[in-house]
Image (cartoon, rainbow, N blue to C red):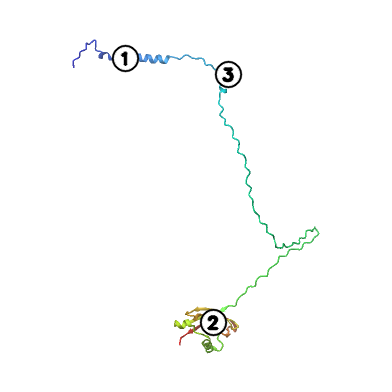
Amino acid sequence: MISYKTPQADLESKKGLFFEIGMVVTLVIIYAAFQFKAPNRARDTALNMTGLTEIEEHIMQTRQPETPPPPQQNPVQQITMLTVVENTEETPELNIQAEIDQNTVIPEYVPVQRAEAEEIIEPEIFLVVEEQPSFPGGDAARLKYFGESIRYPQEARELNIQGTVYVGFVVEPNGSISNVKLLRGIGGGCDEEALRVVTGMPLWNPGKQRGRPVRVHFNLGVRFTLI
C-alpha cells in the first residue's frame, strides 16, 4: 500500500509516547482527588424550641371520636306455662317419734330373714327298671282299648294315610300318665288322635326298682290301618 504522509506527519510511530503521557496525567488526577478534603462545617446543635413548638401545633388530630354504645334493649322474658293438677291421692301419715333423749332405749334392729324357697327335687325318671310298667289287663286289654277309642281321621282316610305313630310318656309311681309327647308322626290328623287316646288311658301298673314304685319312661306305637 502506498503511503501519502510524510514521516514528520505520521503519528503512528508516536503512539507509545502518547499512551505514557496519558497514563501519567490520569495518575496525577486520581492522586489529587484522594488528597482533596471537604471543608468542615460547624453543626448547629442548638435546638430551636420555638420551631419545635410550632411543629407540634400543626400536628393533625388522628384519634377517632368514640361511638356511643347502642341503647340496651330489655331481654324478652320467657314465659313457662304451668298446669296445676289437683292431687287426689291421699298422702300416708308418718308417725315419727322425735322426743328421744339419752335415757331412751332403742331396740336393736333385727333384719327380717326371708324363708328360702325349698328346692323341689323331682324323682328320677328311669328308662330301664327291674319290673316294667304295664297296661292293666295286659297287651290284649291295651289293644282292645285302642281299638275302641281311636277314631280314624277323615283327612287320613281321604289321603289314604296309614302307618304307626310313636308316642312317649312317663308312668308315674301311682300309675298315672304324664309328659305325653309325639316322637314320630304320619300326619293327616293321626298324630293328634294318637296323643288324645294315650292321654286318656286308664292307670297303669307302675314300674318298680328294688321293689319300690318309680317313674318310668315308656314308648308306645299306635298303628293306623285302613280296612
The N terminus sits in image quarter: top left
Nearer to us of marks 1 and 3 is: 3
Image quadrant occupied by the C terminus:
bottom left
Residue 125 shows up from this direction:
yes
Q: Label 3 amino acid?
A: Thr
Quick check: 201 left or right of 162? right
- Secondary structure type for disc 1: helix
The image's mark for residue 196 is: 2
Q: How many labels does the image show?
A: 3
Q: Residue at x 57, y 20 (%)?
A: 54
Pointer 2 local density, CA inside 10 Å: few below 14, some 14–19, many at least 20 = some
| 160 versus 18 height, above or below | below
- Is 86 rendered above or below residue 128? above
**Picture coordinates of residue 21 (x, y %)?**
32, 13
Nearer the observer: mark 3 or 2; the answer is 3
Relative image position of residue 129 (x, y in whole percent): 55, 82
Q: How crowded is mark 3: few (under 14 residues within 10 Å), some or many (20 or more)?
A: few
The type of residue carrying mark 2 is Arg
